[in-house]
Each structure stands twice: as C-alpha cells, then as structure tokens.
Amino acid sequence: MSIKTIILLGAPGAGKGTIAEGIRSASRFLHVSTGDMLREAVKCGTPVGRQAEAFMKRGELVPDAVILGIVEERLDKGGADDAYMFDGFPRTMDQARLLDEILGGRKAVVNKVFLLDAPRALLIARLTGRRVCRKCGQSYHVINIPPKVAGACDLCGGELYQRADDSEATILNRLDVYTKQTETLIAFYEKKGVLVRVDSARPRQETVAEILRGAGALAAS
C-alpha cells in the first residue's frame, strides 16, 4: 500500500471548502487544508509552526519551504496507506514541485487533480453575497444561506457585515491573481494526465458525486 493523494483546485468561490467537506464525509480521504494546518502548527508550537509564526508576526508571507514543512509534519503523523485530499494547494508551480518531492520520498505521487470550474459571473455572485456575524463569526449568504432575519445572525443576533475582501473590486483582483498563478499549474497537471475538470456550478452533492466517481478506488474505505 502507499499514500494516495488528490488535489482540489479552483478559483475563489468555486466551492472548494464545502465540496471538500462533502468528499471527506463520504470517503476515506483526510481533508488537508494548509491554512488550517498552519494555524494548528503555530498554536501547538511545533518547530515548523514557530518558523511560520516568526514570518507572520513580521507581516510577511510564509515561504513555500515552511508551508511544505507543515505538510511533511502532517504526512509524518499518518499511516503508509492513508488517503489525502489537498484543498486549494498547491497554488504555484514551485509548491507543486516541492509537493512532488515530498511525496516521491514516500514512494507516492499526486493521483488526481480535480479542477472545479464555474462561470466568472457565478464566482462573483457567490463571493459578494457572503455575510459574516461580527459577534460569533458565523457565515451566511444573501441567496444561498440567508439568515432568518435580514442583517442578523441566527445564532447570536449579532450584526452581519460584508468583509472588505468580499467587495466586488477585491474579488475581481483575486480572480485575476488566481488565473495568472494557476495557468501553468493546470497545464502541468494536464500534461501529467491527472487533471479532471468538474463543473462546480451545479448543486454541491452532484459535484461531490462526480469527484468520488473520478477518484474511484482511491476513495474506497
């Protein structure tokens, strides 16, 4: 047996987080979010976490080598036949090459990369419609997950607001940055023959079902 790995790629608003949760619930894949792992490593004070914290305190981006160190820490905790689902990582060619090195050292490869496709207009609508509670941080969407009372959190009654990074101007910039960053990455995985394009404009359960079919035996318990 060997480690199995799939990657979910997609622009902001493509639904990576919610789709990843659906896949995790219905399969043996362990959901790997580098953002979550980074925060956990810092909280636990691991050697790599301390490195990351130093950059974060200076307001600097955490270097790829440190991010990959956190990925290595996670893989070291697992078993030789675990199945991992990376959510929105790698984001760049440098990260992809480093991930290949880490997996290669464990006699493993990236098995499948699922690219979540959705029209740009839908991505913008999804992201600009997000609202967050100022008190408890609960998330809503003005169309998809509206609160029972407009502008108020169902859980605590706190005020709902739109984050600055959910404004249309910021979102358009994020989408442009994503496109530039991932063009070569998508071509890289396409050339390897592991890229699968999936329509994520549909209901979540349909997208999850298609990915599970595409993952096949990789997803089996």
Image (spheres, rainbow, N blue to C red):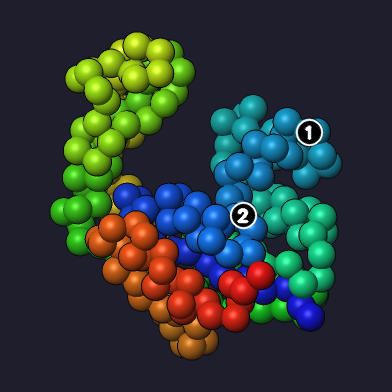
> Image point 25% across, 61% down: which residue?
201
Q: How packed is label 2: few (under 14 Cα within 10 Å), some, or many (20 or more)? A: some
Q: Check if mark 1's residue and mark 2's residue have beta carbons within 8 Å.
A: no
> What type is the residue that disc 2 sits on?
Val
Q: Nearer the viewer, mark 1 or mark 2?
A: 2
> Image point 64% across, 58% down: which residue?
30
Q: Would you say 125 lies left or right of 59 here?
A: left
Which of pointers 1 and 2 lies earlier in the amino acid sequence? Answer: 2
Q: Relative to 105, does residue 172 appear above or below in the rendering?
A: above
Which residue is disc 1 drawn over?
44
Q: Position of residue 40 (x, y in %)?
A: 69, 37
Placement of the C terminus among the 4 image quadrants: bottom right
Give the image quarter of residue 130: top left
> Image point 41% across, 78% down: which residue?
196
The disc at residue 155 is none
> Image point 40% across, 18% down: which residue?
155
Tell me if residue 97 can be seen: no
Q: How packed is label 1: few (under 14 Cα within 10 Å), some, or many (20 or more)? A: few
Which residue is disc 2 drawn over?
32
Placement of the N terminus among the 4 image quadrants: bottom right
Q: Would you say 170 lies left or right of 190 here?
A: left
Q: Residue furthest left?
A: 121
Tell me if residue 42 can be seen: yes
Q: Would you say 127 lies left or right of 139 here?
A: left
> What type is the residue that disc 1 sits on?
Cys
Q: Position of residue 179 (x, y in %)?
A: 33, 62
Q: Position of residue 162 (x, y in %)?
A: 28, 26
* Near-viewer residue (104 or 16): 16
